[in-house]
Image: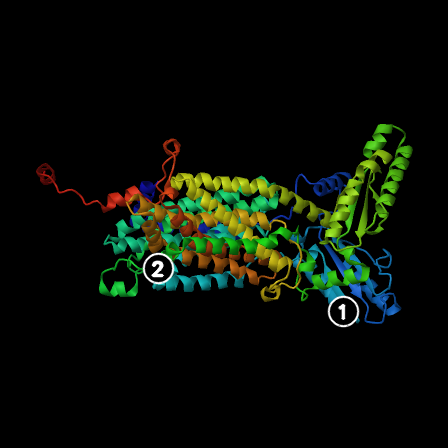
Amino acid sequence: MAEFLYRVGRLAFRRRWYVALVWAAVLAAVGLGALKAPGAADEGFSMPGIESQKAFDLMDERFPGATADGATARVVFVAPKGEKVTAADHRKAVESAVADLADGSQVASAVDPFQAKAVSKDGTTAYATVTYKVASNDLTDASKSQLVKALDQARDTGLTVEAGGTAMDDGAGAGGSAEVIGIAIAAVVLLVTFGSLAAAGLPLLTAILGVGVSMATILTLAHPLGLSTTTGTLAMMLGLAVGIDYALFVVSRYREERAKGREPGEATALAVGTAGSAVVFAGLTVVIALAGLTVVGIPMLTKMGLAAAGAVVVGVLIALTLVPAFLGFWPNAVLRRKDRKRGRIEEEAKDNGGTRWARFVLRRPLPVLILGVVGLGALAVPMTSLQLGMPGDEAKSTSTTERRAYDALAEGFGPGFNGPLTVVVDAKGDTDAKGDADAKGDADAKAAVSTISRKIGATEGVVSVSPARFNKAGDTAVFSVVPSTAPTSERTKDLVTTIRDARPALESGTGATFEVTGSTAMNIDIAAKVQSALVPYLIVVVGLAIVLLLVVFRSLLVPLKAALGFLLSVLASLGAVVMVFQEGHGASLLGVETTGPIMSLMPIFLVGIVFGLAMDYEVFLVSRMREAYVHGETPAQAVTSGFRHSARVVVAAALIMIAVFAGFIGESDSMIKMIGFGLASAVLLDAFVVRMAIVPAVLALLGDKAWWLPAWLDRILPRVDVEGEALTRAADTPDPAPTPADQEAVRV
């Protein structure tokens, strides 16, 4: 692989204009496609294999033409203190507002709260449900403006009017200041690391180009593949982070080769053949981890993982082709200013911050190891109380109308009103089995539904049950169940379990079956599915890490150490997320106003993404140690040599990753905020505690045993020269003096 990449780097350097034009053409093509592509179709959230999804599918089948997938807005009217919405003037204002809300080409219906009995017992609060004919993504600006206008006009009457629901979703993903902050911090880190504006700007430029290509491609494919606005969030995060890092590794190795006196073309080819080999392997680990998210069985997660994997692939290709092409345009610009002035390049000092830190750890390996493991273990303790769920309007800022509507409904109708359960009763099997007349079948179905509704209504923790609504065939009914507790409460989860546990007895007594669904039940089922998939996915990922590192380092203990370190950093970062977003420690510093369950997909995200990033640092740091050990250095000397060459670059890469991810903490969307914090903390812990402290401490304690591999395993493992050891050795070997025959051949 190293020799192939050497030729790629040399070709890109020599044919730099062609390479630059090809990438410019690719960017222009996908950019034009993104501009002309229709918006992503809102296919809704689906989760195959869980009861909630089966119930939704049954509703779609038995209630054809229903607007179940249409956008909804729940408009809440609250009377001034001491007054009631049932007062004549307030009632008139509410009815006028409902009429305005119903006046729209995309509106299917707007239900008057006084006709629907949607008024709180104390008469202070009422709500109107507005249903649209189209999904939230397909709402026109005119429909949204009409909704906002109706709300403002109702507020002018003295009522407090707020609105929630999918119609209020602006469809905005991560963007704006998040990327700007991350890029700005990355620029500072690169400038300090390289001491050159050009060297700092090159990784930034190529990473931005790569993200542009990736995001434009995602937008182009959004409609045919059903990608949502959230799909590109992870691709943007990872594309920017790894794009900068991979270019950083290549540029750093290029400067190292130039310091050895090599010409720009040769230095570029060697940089791509050596550091580029590590980039390919590191990128491959990230891609495999992201693509592996498909095994979880969550379509949204699968799309996000594959989109992010595509962004990583683009980052790798740019690092291997466009970066060496740019080095061909400006071969000396990426060097330090003092080196350019002198006209010669000084080789890296034998003693730097990396070697000093390595010697510190080598002198005290056991205390460093114990401190690192105990510290990460302490951070991981809160994870034992991890509660999974999906954040809703309750997690939004109180400055949003959605959050205020949520609070008003909870106060007026009870905390469980914001997350009602939907029960779908299938009485078709009952009527088919009897084979009686339709009238008798309808009577049996109604009796079965009535029995199930009454029994569920009598369950402890249920506040109310709505009247059942039947389909045209009369064999399926739907009714709502309002819990006494909030949607994210553990008691609500227990209630869902209790209702489902009572199903066998009710089915045997009525001959009808039922399923529990709704947003609350869906979130509960998603959390359960993610929890059940987490351990198998973790086994696959860790097993993959061990196999890949076996091939790279040809050692048994190094891969095991790397995998255990990865587990430590993941568990510790999850513990940090629980401390902030669930327990509330330091939540106000991050702008988190409401704590609650951790997003169900968060553990899967961390396992998949941090695995790839952890392997990045492991490869770039430990491969240089192995190279030094193979060349005859003692284990301690090899650790020091590895840190001398790689520590500064790994630290810079980690700081850039942290900056990019931390920039997303400032987003208003609670899910994006949580992902940004989780990834930033995971990179911080893995790079600086695991890779920079625990890894050298373990290698120091193991000594020569760290690089031991059984002979039989050595024979069957493929040889992958990740650091281009053979390539470097060939380049360092001086050409033999020409023989007389050679000289004669040249003269001829």
Does any portion of residue 22 appear in the rendered image?
no
Q: Position of residue 153 (x, y in %)?
A: 76, 68
Closer-to-camera residue (697/541) = 697
Rendered residue at 57%/47% (across/down): 604
Whether residue 674 appears in this view of the structure is yes
Tags 1 and 2 touching, CB below 8 Å: no
Q: Which mark is residue 356?
A: 2
Left or right of 615? Residue 439 is: right
The residue carrying pointer 2 sits among few (fewer than 14), some (14 to 19) or many (20 or more) residues within 10 Å by Cα, namely: some
Answer with the quarter of the image where residue 99 lies.
Answer: bottom right
Q: Position of residue 668 (x, y in %)?
A: 61, 62
Horizontal and vertical percent for residue 727? Answer: 28, 43
In the image, residue 627 lies at what x, y percent? 32, 46
Which image quarter is the C terminus in?
A: top left
Number of numbered tags placed on the structure image: 2
The residue positioned 88% from the left and 42% from the top of the image is: 450
| Three-letter amino acid code of the residue under disc 2 | Arg
Query: Residue 166 falls in which quadrant of the image?
Result: bottom right
The mark closer to the camera, 1 or 2, is: 2
Q: Is residue 127 above or below residue 224?
A: below
How far is mark 1 from mark 2, CA to CA?
A: 66 Å
Q: Which mark is residue 155?
A: 1
Looking at the image, tell me whether mark 1 or mark 2 is earlier in sequence order: 1
Q: Nearer the viewer, residue 571 or 199?
A: 571
Badge 1 marks a residue whose secondary structure is helix
742 relative to 244, above or below = above
Amino acid of disc 1? Arg
